[in-house]
Image (cartoon, coloured by chain):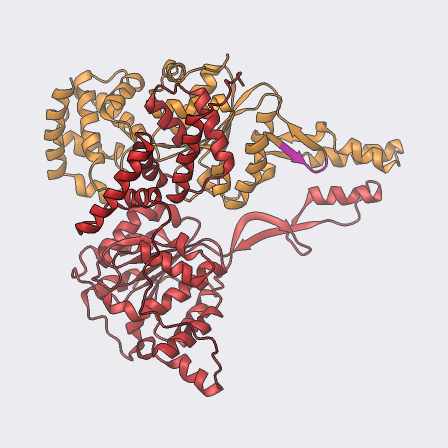
Chain colours: A orange, B red
Amino acid sequence: MSLPTTVEATRQLLAEGGYVADTSLATSVHLALAMGRPLFLEGEPGTGKTEIAKVLAERLGRRLVRLQCYDGLDLAAAAYEWDHARQLMEIRLAETAGVTDRDRLSADLYDRRFLIERPLLSALTGTPAVLLIDELDRADEPFEAFLLEILADFQITIPELGTIRAETPPIVIITSNRTREVHDAIRRRCLYHWVDYPDAVRERAILRLRAPGVPEVLSAQVVAFVQKLRAGDYFKLPGVAETIDWAQALAALEAKELEPGLVDDTLGALMKYQDDIARLRGEETAKLVAEAKVAATRML
Amino acid sequence: MQAEAPPPAGALASNLLAFVRLLRRAGLRLGTADAIEATRALTLLDIGSRRQVQAGLRAILVRRHDQQEVFDQAFALFWRDPEAARHAAAMALMDGIKDKSRPPPASRRVAEALQGDRPPAPKKSDEPPPMLDVAMTVSDRERLMQMDFEAMGAEEIAAAKQEIRKLHLPLDERPTRRFHPHAAGARVDLRATLRDSMRTGGEILGLSRKRRVKRPPPLVVLCDISGSMARYAQILLHFLHAVENDRDRVSTFLFGTRLSNVTRALKNRDPEVAFEMVSHLVPDWSGGTRIGESIATFNHDWGRRVLGQGAVVLLITDGLDRQGAAGLAEAAARLQRSCRRLIWLNPLLRWEGFQPKSQGARALLPHVHEHRPVHNLNALRDLVASLSSPPPRRSSR
């Protein structure tokens, strides 16, 4: 499928995949696609950064190649690896066949047949792909340096083989939860977008799409409650993913409306730190529930 | 990629360049390539839509979340009418000077950038002139090493700074998950082995080996600069500057009544330039202390961003808290749980038989892994030595 040509078309494309984007995000995505630049998405956990790549892959009919980053991720796990066992076998076979020509042996041994493709290389070869480099902040700094060549020129240089260039450059989405500052060199090669928490209108639209079984009244109250909560001073604020979880949890308990006791019992779906839960439980929830109900009637 | 319209010419293009220059003066590091990319982006957007243009330029010209506010304000000011914006900014600056209320930092940066060159910053007058010649005899030096920072005169301070420049901070190294070639490594490097075997026609004569790369963990310094710490802070800042430039992955925060991140400013090689920048960033020199609140702010805003990968935290404070240690114990407990090693450096610990009498010290003490003095050069030297050895076993006090 061809790329969208306007910001509105991009927003439409994302909406078809069940992703509700605001103008600012749709503009960034549109520019990244049109200019062929990687898109660097930073934001709090659970704000739908990874989801964008999944939706883009699905709607554009491309392969999704996902690289989950972790501390110590190296070339062998991220880009390519030589199949040493088969190479050793090849040497033995050459011996029995009596091959003594070193250059030929070397060329035979470092053939594409013996190259194991890992996500980065696989995104450059084969059918057009969406490359998702997920949670780059979890990888260590040396790994970022590996990425520079791929992000700038969509190519990988393998010393034994040469440079492998992508026929169709992949659409690259990089996400970070900011548990570490990603280096400026990476940022320079990308378009940057800070993914914020959605406003009430957008969050309700998201909930309608992602948790369709939740009654309308409950859904509005959940959104109002979470929006109020985000204005507070807590160690970890709930993301959209938590809102969806919580709404589904409440629906599973067959709740029709928010009740302070019910909220206290299900807080674990929303808040993930004991300090925050302890602060909220009791009076604070009762107050927020009352406020949320008022706000929700205005929304409906 | 789609066919593109020719880049906009004339007024729009030159305005865009002026806008990029404005952002540069406001502190965003942007190159010519960024300006070209921005021009290209405009051809891909609906120029009639202000929101689209703003979002598009932001995606290209902003690299960090904290630059976003600067950008948005600059955009709002500039794209009304560049001339009017310049006047408005000048007025805003004047207003800021007239009434004492400080404008938010971002708007001040934009305003200053619009004005062109920054006005020359006021020189700090209490800084002694740099000593050019520090020739010392052995006994002089010995005396200096033991002298309390608080008791030092301007001359001794200058000499102490010279000594501090020579200190290196070798943190104990931690194994990472990365490997490098090493003759005595524990693992066989098959890729290198095979490559070597090519020289002998496929015959493997010896195994190449590799072992884990070791590197020092990140270091985070939280330094108290309130009134009671003023004398120490002046010298310790030199120590922090030396540390920041000696190794990578060091983050430095100063706090009195509020927390300021001075990491980028201290990275400047020239200490005088670095301290000049720091003094601009920090609003609360030699004022009161809110240790609990400052540490809580750190936990909330920065903890998750700089405490990864087994960070060591140096907390430099005398534990004297104006707020009666409100919330300090909770904040310190969380800080301790989030890092690998929390070291409290306390200048008051120099006295024999120091008792944690103040509320702040009593709240802090149960939550630190180590409690060490930092009142003279010898103490600093001991600190350096202790940091290069592995931490003592954690004991629950």
Which of B230/B45 is in front?
Answer: B45
Which residue is painted at 22% across and 57% down in the image? Answer: B257
In the displayed structure image, the side of residue B385 where residue A194 appears, left or right: left
In the displayed structure image, the side of residue A224 where residue A190 appears, left or right: right
Magenta segment: does it hold A206?
no
- Residue A273 placement (x, y as % from top left): 27, 42
Tell me the chief SS of the magenta region.
Answer: strand
Does residue B372 appear in the picture of this structure?
no
Which of A254/B361 is in front?
Answer: B361
In the displayed structure image, the side of residue B93 where residue A282 appears, left or right: left
- Residue A162 placement (x, y as % from top left): 71, 33
Q: Is residue B356 above or below residue B74?
A: below
In the displayed structure image, the side of residue B385 where residue B365 appears, left or right: left
Magenta part of the protein: which range? A156-160
Q: Is residue B259 above or below residue A212?
A: below
Q: Is residue B294 above or below residue A149?
A: below
Which residue is painted at 48% across and 22% down in the image? Answer: A33
Magenta segment: does it hold A159?
yes
- Residue B71, by quadrant, is top left
Does residue B244 appear in the picture of this structure?
yes
- Residue B145 placement (x, y as % from top left): 41, 79
Classify the position of the C terminus of chain A by image quarter.
top left
- Residue A287 placement (x, y as % from top left): 10, 34
Which of A212/A95 is in front?
Answer: A212
Which of B268/A250 is in front?
Answer: B268
What is the number of callouts on the image? 0
Which residue is painted at 36% across and 54% down in the image? Answer: B262
Q: Is residue A190 above or below residue A59?
A: below
